[in-house]
Every structure is written in C-alpha cells, then in structure tokens.
Amino acid sequence: MSDLITPSLVSLDEPLGSTRHDVVRALAERIAREGRASNAAGLEADALAREEKTATGVPGGIAIPHCRSEHVSEPTLGFARLPDGVDWGAKDGPADLVFFIAAPAGADNAHLAILSTLARSLVRKDFTAALRSASSREELVRLVEEVVAPKKPKTETPQAERPASAAAPERRTRLVAVTACPTGIAHTFMAADALSQAAEEAGVELHVEPQGSGTVRPLDPQLIRDADAVLFAVDVDVRDKARFAGKPLVSAPVKRGIDEPAEMIREAVAAAGDPNARRVPAAEGGETSEGRGGSHGSAHDGAQSSSRESFGGRVKRVLLTGVSYMIPFVAAGGLLIALGFLLGSYEITSVADKMVLENSLWNLPQNIPEHAPLGSLGAYLGAVSFKIGQLSMGFLVPALAGYIAYGIADRPGIAPGFVAGAVAGFMGAGFLGGIVGGLLAGLVAAWLGSRTVPRAVASLMPVVIIPLVASIVASGLMVLLLGGPIAALTKALNDWLAGMSGTSAVLLGVILGLMMCFDLGGPVNKVAYSFAVAGLGSAAPGNNAPLLIMAAVMAAGMVPPLGLALATAVRPSLFTPVERENGKSAWLLGSVFVSEGAIPFAAADPLRVIPASMLGGAVTGALSMGLGAASRAPHGGLVVFFAIDRFWAFLLAVLAGMVVTAAAVVVLKSAARRKLDREAAA
C-alpha cells in the first residue's frame, strides 16, 4: 500500500479556491492526472454528492471528503494543506488540512481498512501537528504511510484478549457503542476513536463496534449484557440492533460522535442511572429504529421500549414508516407511466395490455395510437413502460399497509399487512383502507408475537403462525366489516374532489401548499404528498381532480429550495458561506422536487425560513389549482414536463412562489439584521 499516496498527489500551501467545491475539484483533477481516476468530473460529483449528505469537516481544522466511485481505479489519497482555511461545515471554523479519500466502487476490505485507519488517525493531535509542520511533500507522504500500516484497532479488542491487569480496581460505568456512516470509510472510525478517547478521559469503560464498509467485528455478547447503556452514533440503520434490546440508549448522528464525544459519554452515563431513560426497542430480526422499527418481542421488552413514546407519537411513526416505503413504488411507477405517455401518447392506456402481450421488438404493433410521436417502436416501448409503471403503482396500497404493519410488529407484520392492503384495494377502500388494514395487521401480529409459547412452536411463530393468523383476522375484518364503509367514504371523497372548481379548488391548493412547506419532508409534508399520490393512483378516467392536486403538491414542494437559492443569489450577505454553497445545490434539488434541499436553511433559521416557505407554497398551490395545471407524474419536477398539462401554468405557479419565498426571506432576515445592529449600537 506504499503507493496509496505519492508526492504528486500532495498539494502544500497552494491556493485551490475559496470553497469546498473548488478544493474537491482541484484534488479530483490531480487524482485523474495521475491515472488513478478515469473521469475527474465524475469523481468530483461523487464526492460532492457525499458532502450533500453530511459535511465532512471535523474539529481541528480538518476535512475528509471521501467517496466510493466507479471512476476510481485504485484506492487513493489526495492531500491539500491550504494557506487559507475553507469552510467545511465544522463547528470550530474552517479547515486547512484536507484529505480526499477516493476508493473504487468495489474496494475490498483490506483497502477500506487502510483508508479507515487514516481517518481515525486524524483525531490524534500529534499527527495533525506533524502534517502542518511538514516541510516537503515527501515528508508528508512518509507521515501518512506510517499511520496507514494495518494495525488492530483498540476499540475492537475482544474481552478475552485484554490483560487481567487492565481491569479497574472498582467497577466503572460500562458502555457499548456502535458507529456507522453512509460510506463506512471515514466518519465511522473517527467517531469510534473520538468516543473512546472521551470515555478514557471520563474514567468510563467503553467498547465500540464500528460498522464500516469492511468486515465488522461484532461486540462480544457478554460485553453487551454487562453494559449499563448504549451509544449509537449513526447515520444508517444499526445492524442486528436487537442485541441491545432493553438497554438505556443515547442516539445521535455520527458527526456528533466526532464533534461532541464528551457530551455523548456524559449523556450515556446519566441514562445508565435513569430508570426512565429511552431504551433500545426489542425487535425480531434486529432492524429497528425510530422510523423503521417495531415492538415485536416479549411483553416486558415492548413495555420497556415504548414506555416513553406517546400514543400519538407511535401512530405517527408507524404511518410515516408505511409512507416512506410506499414512495419508491410511487415515484418509479409514476415516472414510468409518464415515460409511456411521452413515447406512446396518452392514448396508450387503452392498448398497452394487448401490445405488451402480443408484440415484441421483432414484431412491432401495426395498430398504434393516432398521436404516437415515434411510430410503432415508440408506441411499443411506451406500452411496455406504461404497463411496468402501472403494475408498480398497483403496489401503492399493499406497500403502505405492509410497512405500516412492519412499523408495529417488525418482519412478521409485513405479509399480513400486504395481504390486508391488497384486500383494501380489491374492495375499493383505497388509501384509507390500506391504513386501516395495515394498522389491524400490525396490531394483531404484535400481539401474537408477545405471547409466550412452547419452544417447539416458537420457531414457527414468525414465519407461519403470525402471518397466517394476522392475515385471517385483519383481512377478514376488512372483507366482512370495514371494507364496504371505507370504500363508500373513499368514493364520496373522490366525488367531492371531482366536483371542486373555482374558489374551493384554490382554497385546497393553499392548504396543500402550506402543508408541503411546513416541515420540508417531515410528517405534514408526507401527509399532503401521500394524499396526492393516492388520488393519482386511483384516479378514474375523466376525473381530472387528482391530476390537479398532484400538480399543486409537486409545484409547492419545489418552492422552498428554489426560493432560498434565489435569496442567496440576490442577497448573499444575509447568508453564511455554508448557506451560500447550499444555495447553489438547492437550484438543482428544487427543480427536481426535492423539498429537503431547504432543510439546512430551515435548521439554521426556522423562524424566518419556514414562514417564508409556507407563504410561497400557498401562492404556488393556489395558482396551480386555479390555472388548471395537471400532472400525471408523482415526482420529477421540471424533468417530467411532458407529463404536465398546462405546463406554462405549472411553471408560472412555481416561479411566483419562488419569488414570494425569496422576497419574504430577504425581508425577514434584513429586519433581524437591522434589529441586531440597533442593539449593538445601543
């Protein structure tokens, strides 16, 4: 591994630009020049995409942009020591030491282990001091090579290998921790070492399991049993989380494990002595979290894990679990349907089934829709795309119900939830029926899972007995009692929407716009979006109301990031350097309907950003509904222009809301700035 970094991959005290994008671009180009990446722009894009998830600046003036990329041919370290620091998102200021870790998409465990060793060495002050004082590229390469030599991480030493003399004379608080980041290369291991150092300084016994991209060495089960509390510093699901069930829990993003390790250790010690502390929920199969988990397990464990969660909070959590898993079916299916319309015209709906079954690429259809723009080939491909999308959209209600049940009962709830959702769709109960069926299936499965049964039967419970009984009960209730009334309610709601016009339609647009911009991808936003896609999935021929609602929801969801991007361009002095950088990416995110592009702004200044976003969203929703914009695609923003009727009205609504949001943000922030100036003068 001696060629992981070479002098030609090092930049010492050269100005590479004033933003993190400039520095990443310069290092990517350097790596490509050395023949280690096939495409500098592609490597830059992959690294910046990783930056969008979480800024890679860490305390101590260090930044570690990193990614795994198909453009990288061999594991590589690019390094820059900057003459002037660049803002990289760390709380303590700009970074002057930048390591660019570029790993191939299929990097093996040995490569990833070495890259991880470097990342965790960056928390050592003696190492970073040596990097700052190195007088030549060759000296810096030697320093790096000394720390990337493979060695067994201290935090992964099994209990049996620790000498008996290492035990403290009296019992200290015992903690176990898991660290994990999306790429599993850098932050995972830096958080592990930062927490270990903080624990040592606090006199606390800590054992860490870094769940990186390489081989994971699980914690000794005895260590977990003996632990007084658990720390999760993670941005992804914890693997085999059920091992920690019932333990007091402190959980935070992985970056907090690097930035504030001492605070996390103190919180964990406090939780260890608090009988009312939040605890790791029990789960069958281990995959549980606030947004995805369940309570399948013993009655005692279930009570322990949910004692601090209100009924309303629990209901919200499981509903959002269902919605979050449903959306990929909707997004993929809706875009495929839109592509089918583009290739085969809107008339493809009446002939798609026959074309797919009776024709092929070698036997193109002769009778095609009159308005098909690309002839027989386009019509056939449009029919295929439309049919795949239609089948994907058919999973809308079953997936919603299945994963609501999963949110309550974990894996044993999935099958009965899907069945109940399919029954709801069959009976015409739609979106509302899916919610009710999923809740019923999940509750029955969770109740069955909490029963104490003989050992001979226990192995059959999660794979046979629970799915069978829960399916019979939940789906039986839907067929015998609940499906008919819910279907009637759904029909009445659809009829009301179909009859809306004029003022009532505009008012609905205002409400939907406010909801889409209230929490930017949160529960309220998801309720409005789910309402729209459910109507789109069940829209009857000739009923244009669901298409109008979908257009209003999508247009309003685009407004917050676009409005804030415009505000940063018009009045950059009102925003921090990091916000100005986020504003550049918000243009793209907003244009493709990713409302979350405004979250960094809202998190920094919610009292001004959220009201301004809601104001713009209300204007957009009202204009979109009033002008009759209609979307046959549930996602994509401007990319799916071909699936939007009256696209000019859709675009006008988005532009109006964007300008209103930008103006409101500028006014509110300027007023706050003037107030601060007056107070300072006083």
Image: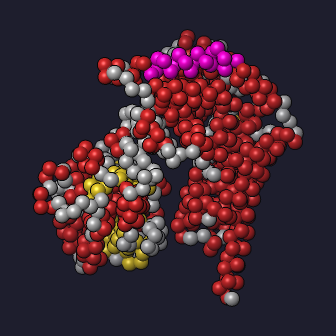
Q: Residue at x 71, y 54 (%)?
A: 614
> Residue lying furthest right in this view?
502
* In magenta stretch: residue 469: yes
Q: Residue at x 49, y 43 (%)?
A: 306
**Quick check: 428 above or below 63?**
above
Q: Is residue 260 visible?
A: yes
Q: Position of residue 259 (x, y in %)?
A: 40, 65
Q: Is residue 377 visible?
A: no
Q: Nearer the viewer, residue 578 or 516?
A: 516
**Quick check: 422 above or below 643?**
above
Stretch of the chain drawn in magenta: 466-484
Q: Position of residue 246 (x, y in %)?
A: 38, 44
> Residue lying furthest bottom in this view?
682
> Residue lying furthest top in this view?
358
Look at the image and tell me in which quarter the N terminus lies: bottom left
Q: Position of residue 138 (x, y in %)?
A: 20, 71
Quadrant position of residue 439: top right
